[in-house]
């Protein structure tokens, strides 16, 4: 019996650093969230696509503002990211899930396939890219220490997990403030295999991240 995979798109942020809700910003005629959703809607390996919307919005208003098609399933988000992901995990009934940030609408299809392949083989997969810049760590005394960039990675999404495992990890989490699912998975003791990410898979954080030069990342 074939396994099922759902895509869970996190789009419940307030966009404080962006200056407005960045999930609705225009990207060549479509919203950021629609661009992110489109990465998975056309993938034959994906069963359903869920989009988590802000807790202070109505589902129909979010769907209309984001210009999302009816085959996308809206899930109400929480005040923090952990609750938003947990709500989506409970809404999904798939064997596996891909947890993706709507703010990463340029994730290449070949990278998504790497995540899926490793996830199905090992139960989890986290895309990451090695750092090329010189990295420093600020000590409490104000001094700078070197970091070995060969051992430092920038973590991306989508992150893939066996749903029942990552659901248990979220239910067992301690406190809040987690910035991604791999942190919660590691705290729970889950193995988080790394796969090659992509420099094209940038995260839209500030308004200057959206500009005419973005076409090169398509």
Image: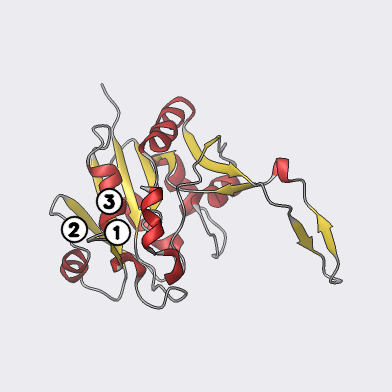
How far is mark 2 from mark 1, CA to CA?
8 Å
In screen coordinates, is 85 left or right of 94? Answer: right
Q: Name the image quarter holding residue 108.
A: top left
Residue at the top extreme? 1
Compare residues 109 and 213 and report the one nearer the observer: 213
The correct choice, above or below, for 16 with respect to 209 in the image is: below
Closer to the chain start, of discs 3 and 2, is 3
Check disc 2 and report its element: helix, strand or loop: loop
Q: Do the residues labelled 3 and 2 touch (CB within 8 Å)?
A: yes
Q: Is 15 or 25 nearer to us in this picture? A: 25
Reading the image, the residue beneath label 3 is: 37
Q: Marks 3/2: CA distance?
A: 8 Å
Compared to residue 162, the image places residue 218 above or below, namely: below
Q: Quadrant of residue 151?
A: top right
Q: How many labels does the image show?
A: 3
Write the residue at 39% across / 64% down. 211
Q: Mark 1 points at which residue?
A: 33
* Above or below 45: residue 184: below
Helix, strand or loop status at disc 1 = helix
Q: Mark 2 sits on what residue?
A: 68
Q: Are marks 2 and 1 in contact (CB under 8 Å)?
A: yes
Q: Are marks 3 and 1 in contact (CB under 8 Å)?
A: yes
Residue 209 coordinates in the image, percent (x, y): 44, 64
What whole-number distance in Å separates the C-alpha atoms at marks 3 and 1? 6 Å
């Amino acid at each position: 019996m074939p396994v099922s995979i759902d895509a869970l798109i996190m789009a419940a942020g307030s966009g404080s650093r962006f200056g407005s809700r960045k999930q609705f910003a225009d990207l060549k005629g479509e919203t950021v969230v629609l661009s992110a959703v489109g990465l998975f809607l056309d993938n034959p390996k994906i069963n359903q696509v869920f989009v988590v919307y802000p807790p202070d919005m109505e589902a129909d208003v979010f769907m209309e503002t984001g210009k999302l098609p009816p085959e996308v399933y809206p899930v109400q988000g929480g005040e923090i990211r952990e609750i938003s992901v947990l709500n989506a995990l409970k809404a999904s009934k798939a064997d596996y899930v891909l947890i993706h940030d709507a703010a990463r609408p340029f994730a290449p299809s070949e990278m998504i396939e790497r995540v899926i392949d490793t996830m199905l083989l090992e139960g989890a997969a986290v895309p990451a890219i090695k750092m090329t810049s010189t990295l420093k760590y600020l000590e409490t005394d104000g001094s700078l220490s070197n970091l070995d960039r060969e051992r430092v990675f920038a973590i991306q999404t989508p992150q893939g997990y066996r749903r029942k495992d990552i659901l248990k990890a979220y239910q067992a989490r301690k406190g809040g403030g987690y910035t991604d699912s791999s942190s919660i998975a590691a705290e729970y003791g889950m193995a988080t295999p790394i796969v090659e990410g992509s420099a094209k898979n940038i995260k839209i954080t500030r308004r200057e991240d959206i500009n005419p030069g973005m076409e090169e990342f398509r």
